[in-house]
Image (cartoon, rainbow, N blue to C red):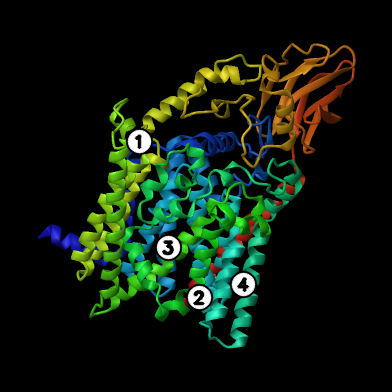
Amino acid sequence: MLLQTILKYIYKKSWLIVLIGISIAYFPLISSIMSIKNDSCVLSYPIFYFFSNQLNNDIIPFWHFNMHFGFALYADPGTPFLNPIFWLFALANSSIYTYVLYILFHIVLGSIGMFLLGKQLGFEQKTNTILAVAYIAGGYFVAHLQHSNHIIECTYLPFVINFLYALFKKPNLKNTLLLGLFLYLFTISGYPGFAIGMPYYIIILGIGYIINQSYKKKFPEKLRAMGLFCISVAIAIILCLPFLYALYTNMENFQRASTFSGNSYLFEGGASPVLGFASFILPLASVVKNSPFLSSDMAWNNMYIGIVVLIFFLASIKYKNLFIILPHLMAIAFFLDISFEGQIKQLFFKLPLLNFLRYNGGLRIYAMLSMIIVAGYTINNFFITEKLDTKRLVTIIKILFIIVSAVLVTTIIYSLINHSFIFNNEGSLAKKILHINLSQAIILQSVYVLIVLFFFKKWINNKRSVLLIALVDIIICFWVNLPFSGLSIKSMPTITRDIEASSKFINEQQSFTIQTDSVLKPAINHVVYAPALLSNKVGVIPPHAYPSGKKTYFEFIEKNGLNYFNNKPTCFLQSKNTVALPYTINAESIKIECSTTQQDTLIIFQNFDKNWKAYSNNNMLTITQWKNNFMQIILPANTKNIQLIYNDNAINKLLFVPIIGLLTILFILLYTYKKNN
């Protein structure tokens, strides 16, 4: 009786269902049974650690000294330097558990954004429940848990589209301010590719609405909405001024600051149309491929939204709904087109700004969002219609049943002929599971899909059962795909111990030498690739394509190799180039102990930046470039002790713009709310 009462209460409170769905889907991460991996652990978390460590020492981390020999952290578009939520979590603690909470917070926030977007579109609560869970536990999220900056950006996307719709539906100050606010948060939260894709998404939706003439407001109202939209964009630009300034002043230094000319992420990793569409039904098949991880682009950008949601999406594509869903069908076609391989992806190379992106699959989130919205129209009709007409849904179920059955039978026959159905007998059970081949993945998930189709058809006239199977299907597939793309099979305590061991190893090395590849190797494992990033020392890590990497540094490494730095001190006098000078370093200063009897040159292995100023006994010294990359200072005779201060006056002043802007927006919104109530 009590259980029945609880279930009825939960069924009535859709937000509770969403929260339960998130908790179940993300239980492996919440419970610490599994942990973040790859970029989230190796790149994003170390940046968070550094950021937190400096803030808690009362230092604003403008300069990151132990990655690529230093770069302006505030200029790194891959770091959410201006995101106030990032600051709050960084101020709280630097542990990896805090960083995971930061990710989980955004996942919950993203589900709220999707729920609000559904509500904005006029969908009822059960529909919004399915859409919210489909969004934050769909294939894109499970794939990108290893790229946490993607997850953070995905959080703000439904908020932007929600307030975009709200503004054109009800052009007022509140919606103008909120759209500007979320455009700002969306732009500065760690993955710049999304911001490049956003104008295309908005333009395509706008063209779609013009074509289908669904926007029937009078011209003055249209004009007012367009004017307020421009004001929202202007607000976002003003709030982003520090970000834009940092990009502009550092653009020539970025490793990626050149026209895109193609790379292995496209030529090896672009999703083929076959695997691209297969991922809608068999996501595991698109992750487990007979190819290395880096060439498995689908492992990063899986399009799975749930079998039940997919059936509703297919049911929506009919002439009767065409005018309503046309804008989103156009968006789906565009963003899937630019992410496929071969000639079909040529738009990616031709259109402005897209050629600055490193790979093409990330923008598939826009297609996924539009698919969920399109499905929402039919899901909503399903839940609000008293007398259900399920003929179209049943027909689609039967067609999918035939297709998946044919795939299953064909794969079994192929596997038997080629003896590819034998499981790997080496290693632990977890490794055996993770090393299944493509045929095994297709067979296993085909059986699962057939079971889901069977129960969906059987329960199709029971709305509560349909809600349940839709959510369960999404969550089960989320769990199945987690070890293959989203999370590490190592537990959080294990990862924490690995990080601590690696950091301890590095910090115990000699204080005044560069931490090089050869030194790092004993501490390196697949969990912590660059432990130098978790220390307070200058370290050399292999060049990679992180946006912040300075061109000059990469060119130097290409010419001289990492071995150049073996046994080299971090800073030294040219007259004694093998003797390390004692130094201390943080994100705002470098203090070097030295003493000269005659003129000498101080060499510092930190990238040259015009914002570094050097002083000795209150006298300013001139910093110039050494080997076209690092810093050198001519020291007069009898110079004692040097201090370098990093200070960008412009960014110091510009940082007040978003602070004042956010406080102003908050004040206006609170005043408006109080006035209306």
Q: Residue at x 74, y 39 (%)?
A: 647
Q: Which of disc 4 and disc 2 is earlier in sequence?
A: 4
Judge depth for marks 1 and 2 and give the one in front.
Answer: 1
Give the CA distance from mark 4 to mark 3: 21 Å
At label 3, the amino acid type is: Met
Q: Quarter of the image holding residue 203?
A: bottom right
Secondary structure under the numbered disc 2 in the rendered image: helix
Asked whether, in this view, residue 108 is left or right of residue 86, the answer is: left
Q: Which of disc 1 and disc 3 is earlier in sequence?
A: 3
Quadrant (top left/top right/bottom left/bottom right) for the C terminus: bottom left
Which mark is drawn over residue 434?
1
Residue 638: image x %, image y %?
87, 15
Badge 2 is on which residue? 675
Is the residue 599 above or below the residue 358 in the image?
above
Badge 3 is on which residue? 114
Residue 327: image x %, image y %?
51, 72
Q: Are marks 1 and 2 in contact (CB under 8 Å)?
A: no
Badge 4 is on which residue? 229
Asked whether, in this view, residue 570 is left or right of residue 334, the answer is: right
Q: Quarter of the image holding residue 662?
A: bottom right
Q: Residues within 10 Å of mark 1 (few under 14, many from 20)?
A: some
